[in-house]
Image (tube, rainbow, N blue to C red):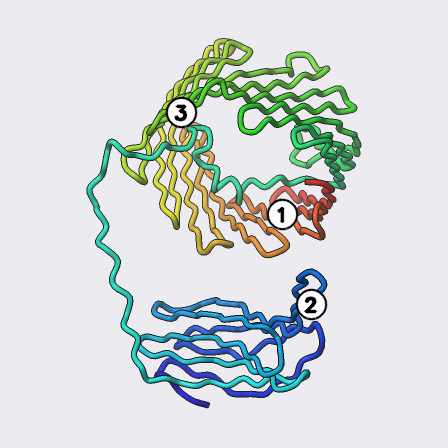
Amino acid sequence: MERLDHAFACSTETLKFKEANVLRLPQIKFGHSSLLIKLFPSRVVYRGERVERRVGLEGLEGLEEGVRIVVESRKWKEGKETRVLVVVGGRRGVLEVCNRNRNRIQISLSSMATPIPPPPPPPPADTKVDYLNLPCPIPFEELHREAMMSLKPDLFEGMRFDFTKMLNQKFSLNHSVFMGPTEIPSQSTETIKIPTAHYEFGSTFIDHPKLLLWGRILTDGRLNARVKCDLSENLTFKANAQLTNEPHMSHGMINFDYKGKDYRTQFQLGNGALLGASYIQSVTQHLSLGGEVFWAGQHRKSGVGYAARYNTDKMVATGQVASTGMVLLSYVQKVSEKVSLASEFMCNYLSRDVTASFGYDYILRQCRLRGKIDSNGCVAAFLEERLNMGLNFILSAELDHRKKDYKFGFGLTVGE
């Protein structure tokens, strides 16, 4: 074992491998961190009728500041080698992976005392706010979208199968089958469920990025439709409707969204004499402030709301309050590119209802796992596993210990 620095150590070993196996090399330690390298000794690259074998190394995790890894991958031929340059502070070492014969690899570490000058410090950030060059904020209705991704997954109970067939680049057909229980309202504390099953047929037309047409019809007679059309570069028209056989249960709404340079505004019109308007403005590079107002003519109710959103590359914090008594706070911390944590606090100071939730979103190479737990004793998890290109397996679970209501579901999604 040779040492480059007091915080760096690596072992020298000779390891065997078999064809098409993945070889894990010993850990290289950097103080409290470590680097685990995986070696692919039989990676085949096809170039016409000629076949080349290459050596590849990957796996850079938990590196401290000042540690840099450079991988040079060369052809897998007799006498060739693959070098991994490790830089720690002002010193560097070369980790060599040499091909001694067909079934053996030798790993050695050599040190070089030539100091490497540290990189120049980054220029100081300009803290002065340029109010003439502020970013455009997200729509007012999507203020909590990062938190909703973790805290509001598409949970279901029973079995679900979705199939999407692309007819061309713009038009696709959708088929969906669902079998599972449906909750019905009850005056008792116990949950009453009845078994149901239905088939859903739909179609989608996308003329990106100007036009979107989306429609779904179910065997029970429900019809859902959505339209999104960009009337100009800044003005967008949206409409959605749901038609049912039950009286007074059908509804529709249209929206006009205007996107400015550093602001957004929206106007809503719905059935039941529902009118609404919202506005959000970027105040700094990271802070946005906005407000909304609505009027429900059928119920003779009105309300005013205010919101604030602060976002950086690592976190998103949002607060919203309305005259209806609702207070909603959310916070999302991006631990890494694959992991994010979310929390939410929601209360109604008129009805004295308070709920706190904590969730996570973990993206792996072949799957995505989301889940949450709240103060009401409800635990939920949602897993999307990519089995193959265009084939996904779904698992859903929700446990409500207070109501003793347990929901489990699984499904398959075919097509993109």
Q: CA distance from mark 2 to mark 3?
A: 53 Å
- Viewer-proximal residue, 347 or 169? 169
Q: Quadrant of residue 178?
A: top right
Q: Are marks 1 and 2 in contact (CB under 8 Å)?
A: no
At label 3, counting other C-alpha atoms closer than 10 Å, the crowd grade (few under 14, some 14-19, many 20 or more) is: some
x 75%, y 33%: residue: 176
**Residue 51, percent across and down?**
69, 67
Which label was assigned to residue 83? none
**Residue 363, percent across and down?**
56, 53
Task: Let me know if residue 183 appears in the view.
Answer: yes
Query: Does 243 appear above or below 319?
Result: above
Q: Nearer the viewer, mark 1 or mark 3?
A: 3
Q: Which residue is mark 3?
A: 259
Q: Quadrant of residue 65?
A: bottom left
**Residue 98, percent across and down?**
56, 82
x 31%, y 32%: residue: 282
Q: Which residue is mark 1?
A: 382
Query: Does 282 appear above or below 337?
Result: above
Query: Does 385 appear above or below 67?
Result: above
Q: Quadrant of residue 272?
A: top right
Query: Does 232 appear above or below 350?
Result: above
Disc 2 or 3, which lies upstream in sequence? 2
Left or right placement of residue 337 versus residue 222 in this view: left
x 70%, y 15%: residue: 246
